Image (spheres, rainbow, N blue to C red):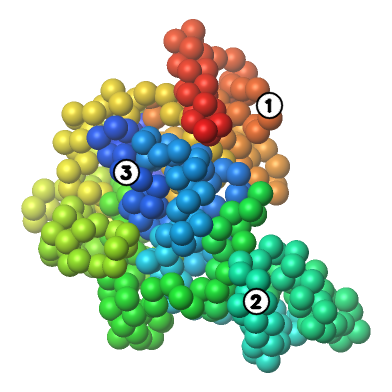
């Protein structure tokens, strides 16, 4: 069941256009509201708080910044570390089952934090007790208030004669969210307040049912649902893409995608409100291959056609028809925020840009990504927050591109301003 690309040839731009459609960035595939936009993606990277409204509004054109704030305030959307050690936004209905299914991938990090900083089970239990007691009294907390409470409770003491308080703060924040005790919800200024996660739909309420943790009877089914939601909202994707997105081993990611193809042939059952697609609406997935390098194309495999040993991709079955009908919308100019899933949601991004473009998006080694401008499926510029446009290649490729880029930026800035 090989599903990785051995070739170093770039993916065709056609793949980028197809991904734009899957990502809900054209009128035919946008979401009706911001909660649906997140549910369709399963998770949207959210480490830069100020970039989250941009990522949601571009996928839900009828929504406003106030709608984003309200979704977090109601608890319909939450922010946490459900996977990959990276902050993501998820629908509340998806938070616990996704977290539980992938939590084992950070077990090594937990062991290191115990060994290096003394963040053991007893310390975590005490930190949880302090946090939950304070939340019960005061409601959702600013991070500084919670950290001060932990300090006052004596949880930041030296470990083996060294001051490890700065490490303990982060590790406790992440671990208690990783374990489903805390989560981030309503936004206040440039942060999301910490709240009790135990009132969210539990891990047994997800589409795969009960026991989804690693080693549990529902784990394989949960991985199939993760793979399905990922491929349907990000495709075309490979097993390497899914492995990077989830940190699952590549062999398990490949199996999950094959399971997702079978899952897509089954009717969807009704799940919790806001937890993905409604009953009966699941779009099948198909296998595909990219051919011809950067100027090549995307070809779905026919029934019974054997899969290649490398380069196997997965996508929603109606994607070729959508691309044919809505190519001009996919080729339009798109202004996307920092850490947008169209860029960070894949291991192989060669259909979107080259190494020069990657350096333009993330010029330093600190992992901070700039907002991007995409035209005809390719990166044409970045727009650092508070700065002007920086063109790939040093200048706008044409007057038309310059005009369309400026229009796209202006439209989104107006929407973000409310």
Marks 3,2: beta carbons within 8 A: no
Res. 137 mark: 2
Q: Secondary structure at mark 3?
A: loop
Q: Secondary structure at mark 1?
A: loop
Between disc 2 and disc 1, whose residue precedes?
Answer: 2
Residue identifier under label 3: 31
Residue identifier under label 1: 387
Q: CA distance from mark 3 to mark 2?
A: 37 Å
Q: What percent of the width, then of the height, locates residue 42?
A: 38, 58
Question: Can you name the residue that lies furthest to the right here?
Answer: 161
Q: Secondary structure at mark 2?
A: helix
Q: What percent of the width, then of the height, locates residue 217?
A: 30, 85
Marks 2,1: beta carbons within 8 A: no
Query: In this view of the protein, which residue sits in the foreground, 128 or 357?
Result: 128
The 10 Å Cα crowd at callout 1, few under 14, some 14 to 19, many 20 or more, is few
Instruction: Write down the quadrant of residue 251 in the picture.
Output: bottom left
Q: On screen, 409 above or below 150? A: above
Marks 3,1: beta carbons within 8 A: no
Instruction: Report whether 366 appears left or right of 194.
Output: right
Between disc 3 and disc 1, whose residue precedes?
Answer: 3
Of circles 3 and 1, the one toward us is: 3
Q: What percent of the width, then of the height, locates residue 406?
A: 52, 17
Between disc 3 and disc 2, whose residue precedes?
Answer: 3
Q: On screen, 327 above or below 111? A: above
Q: CA distance from mark 2 to mark 1?
A: 43 Å
- Residue at point 49% right, 31% down? 415
- Residue at point 49% right, 35% down? 336
Query: In this view of the protein, which residue sits in the foreground, 244 or 172?
Result: 172
Of circles 3 and 2, the one toward us is: 2
Quarter of the N terminus within the rendering: bottom left
Q: CA distance from mark 3 to mark 1?
A: 30 Å
């Amino acid at each position: 069941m090989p599903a990785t690309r051995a070739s170093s040839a770039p993916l065709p731009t056609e793949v980028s256009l197809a991904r734009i459609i899957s990502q809900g960035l054209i009128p035919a595939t946008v979401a009706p509201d911001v909660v649906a936009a997140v549910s369709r993606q399963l998770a949207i990277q959210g480490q830069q708080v100020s970039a989250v409204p941009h990522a949601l509004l571009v996928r839900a054109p009828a929504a406003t910044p106030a709608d984003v704030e309200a979704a977090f305030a109601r608890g319909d959307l939450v922010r946490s570390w459900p996977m990959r050690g990276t902050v993501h936004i998820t629908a509340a209905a998806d938070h616990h089952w996704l977290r539980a299914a992938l939590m084992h991938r950070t077990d090594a990090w937990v062991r290191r934090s115990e060994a290096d900083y003394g963040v053991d089970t007893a310390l975590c239990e005490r930190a949880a007790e302090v946090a939950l007691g304070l939340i019960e009294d005061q409601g959702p907390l600013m991070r500084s208030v919670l950290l001060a409470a932990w300090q006052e409770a004596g949880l930041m003491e030296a470990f083996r004669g060294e001051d490890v308080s700065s490490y303990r703060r982060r590790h406790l924040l992440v671990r208690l969210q990783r374990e489903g005790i805390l989560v981030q919800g309503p936004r206040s200024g440039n942060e999301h307040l910490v709240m009790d996660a135990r009132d969210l739909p539990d891990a047994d309420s997800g589409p795969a049912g009960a026991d989804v943790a690693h080693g549990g009877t529902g784990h394989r089914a949960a991985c199939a649902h993760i793979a399905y939601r990922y491929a349907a909202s990000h495709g075309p994707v490979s097993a390497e893409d899914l492995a990077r997105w989830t940190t699952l081993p590549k062999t398990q990611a490949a199996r999950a995608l094959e399971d997702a193809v079978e899952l897509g042939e089954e009717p969807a059952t009704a799940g919790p409100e806001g937890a993905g697609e409604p009953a009966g609406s699941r779009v099948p997935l198909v296998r595909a291959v990219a051919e011809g390098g950067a100027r090549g194309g995307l070809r779905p495999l026919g029934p019974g056609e054997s899969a290649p040993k490398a380069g196997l991709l997965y996508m929603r079955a109606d994607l070729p028809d959508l691309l044919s009908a809505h190519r001009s919308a996919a080729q339009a100019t798109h202004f996307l925020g920092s850490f947008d899933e169209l860029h960070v949601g894949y291991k192989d991004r060669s259909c979107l840009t080259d190494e020069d473009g990657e350096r333009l998006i993330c010029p330093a080694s600190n992992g901070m990504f700039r907002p991007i401008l995409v035209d005809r499926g390719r990166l044409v510029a970045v727009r650092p927050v508070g700065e002007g446009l920086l063109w790939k290649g040093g200048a706008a490729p044409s007057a038309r591109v310059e005009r369309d880029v400026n229009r796209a930026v202006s439209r989104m800035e107006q929407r973000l301003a409310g």
